[in-house]
Amino acid sequence: MMSVRSWRIRRLGIVFVGALVVLVGAIAASRAVGSTTATPGQTLTMDRALDITGFDPVTQIDFSSIYSDLQVYNRLVELAPDGKTLVPGLASRWAFSDQGREITFTLRTGVKFSDGSPLTPADVVFSLKRATNPKSAFGSLFGGGVRSIVALGPDRVRITLAKPFAPVLSSLSLWLGSIYSKANWLKWGKAASQHPVGTGPYELASWTKGSQLVLVPNRYYWGSPKPTVAKIVFKVVGDGTARALALESGAADMIDVVPPNQVAAIKRSGSNVVSVPGPAVELISLNENTVPAFKDRNVRRALAYSINRAAVVKAAYFGQASRARSVFPSGTLFYDPKGAATYDIAKAAAYLKASGFAQGFSFKLTVPSGGSAEATIAQIWAADLAKLGIKLTIQTLDQTTALQEWSSEKYQATIMPWVNDTPDAFEICQYTVSATKPTGVTAFHTGYVNKHATALAQEAESALSDRVRQRDYSAIQRILNSDQPLLYVVDTPVLYGVSSKVHGFTPNRAGNGNYYFNKVTLSP
């Protein structure tokens, strides 16, 4: 699954630590509703790089929209703050049967939507049928194999899978698994995404497209803690430096997508930078269908060993990154850094000599306009490739055009960041080693096919043993290290700028750094 956040391709999924973890002990089935503890007049302003596209979880592809969904909707299960376990959400408990093919969820009692109407199994069935539709953009998050979703009486819902799918709970905890009011959705029809009614801690107050989004506490919120901030204002500020200056001056309380070169200045101003390590990796995608040399594995190996990752960390990310050691981001479950390519020009030269292109060749690398880090990567790499007799030409395109060239496979090589939705490895494998759909993205648009890796990925998705999954995903990473269809450069953190008067902002340490505001407080 793809989504773009400031030219960042996202990914799908979420975390499932034990193949069939069933949490023992349900959280209290009902909570007090009808009141909030919001402090009158308190407003939190967050400048974000992108505006939202609406509140339809099935169609969201950008982080601003997804993180806004997380504020107004809940899911049956939620990813815990530790990023490793799943906890009850709208479902107080669940149970697996039929060797993992059936999951029966018991819903909390007393939960209401933000319009005061009660949550029912019909709302859950309606929401999840839309989410799991194999024809939808992200149906692959559920393995493309949900047979049925049915209500069982007044408080239960059963999901039946075509085959065991280990990350199913992880996928349900994604924004995609958000539950909303069926009656409200049908009432508004095509405009429903602009009129969300959920059970989350906040609800929509206003949205001025291209300018700002305002959320206020949901007085019927069932969970704990209740929101204390009376109003959250998300302003759209596309320029990273402008966002940083707004934070430093006090015009904004928080910002997202902090430019690495602004980290030091933000800290000097007295604000904090919250770094979420592990969810992202900077990849270079090689199109084997447009550059004949890329079909040669020894050429790809030479390219992998020609990247000076340490220099990139210092010059492009100002130390706010680390050398990548796998196509998988370092925070991914079943990550295995053994056997990674390192910077070694002598080894790169030896691989090139063993290839069919020993005299060198030329190719074009696309970088997005405004992507200063990507441009620096390209410049550093071009200098080292020249030592091997390989000519790299840097092409700068606007982000939309660059993405279109990549998705239509008209590019030669491009820098394509990947950001996990979840640390579960199934997600990135669906994009990097799958030789077939359902993702619609065949091997990250590289033309690369490895049937053994594809088979291992399919086996790992269905395995209900972490031992088996680790074995398979480690084997896949060894194959990718040998074949190098995608070149990994650096692991990059998700960075937020936060004023010193903001307390309790704890983005999830796994997934992609998603965040909630019901635990956030503001000092005067």
Image (tube, helix red, strand yellow):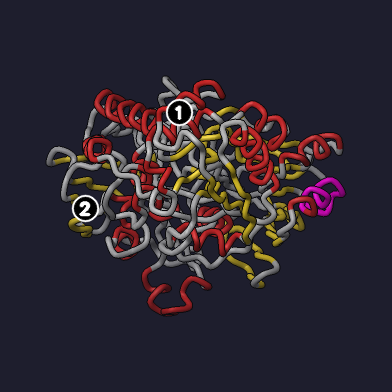
Question: Magenta stretch: dominant SS?
Answer: helix
Nearer-the-camera pick, 374 or 44: 374
The amino acid sitting under disc 2 is: Gly
x 50%, y 36%: residue:
359
x 51%, y 49%: residue:
413
The amino acid sitting under disc 1 is: Lys
x 29%, y 64%: residue:
135
- Residue picked out by circle 2: 145
Q: Is residue 248 magenta?
A: yes
- Residue picked out by circle 1: 353
Nearer-the-camera pick, 243 or 385: 385
Nearer-the-camera pick, 456 or 89: 456
Q: Would you call the spot at circle 1 few (<14 residues within 10 Å), some (14-19), or many (20 or more)?
A: some
Q: Residue furthest front?
A: 359
Q: Position of residue 317 (x, y in %)?
A: 69, 36
Q: Secondary structure at mark 1?
A: helix
Q: Position of residue 340 (x, y in %)?
A: 46, 24
Q: How many marks?
A: 2
Task: Work out which quarter of the rendered image holds the C terminus and state it.
Answer: top right
Q: Which contiguous range is marked in magenta?
A: 243-252
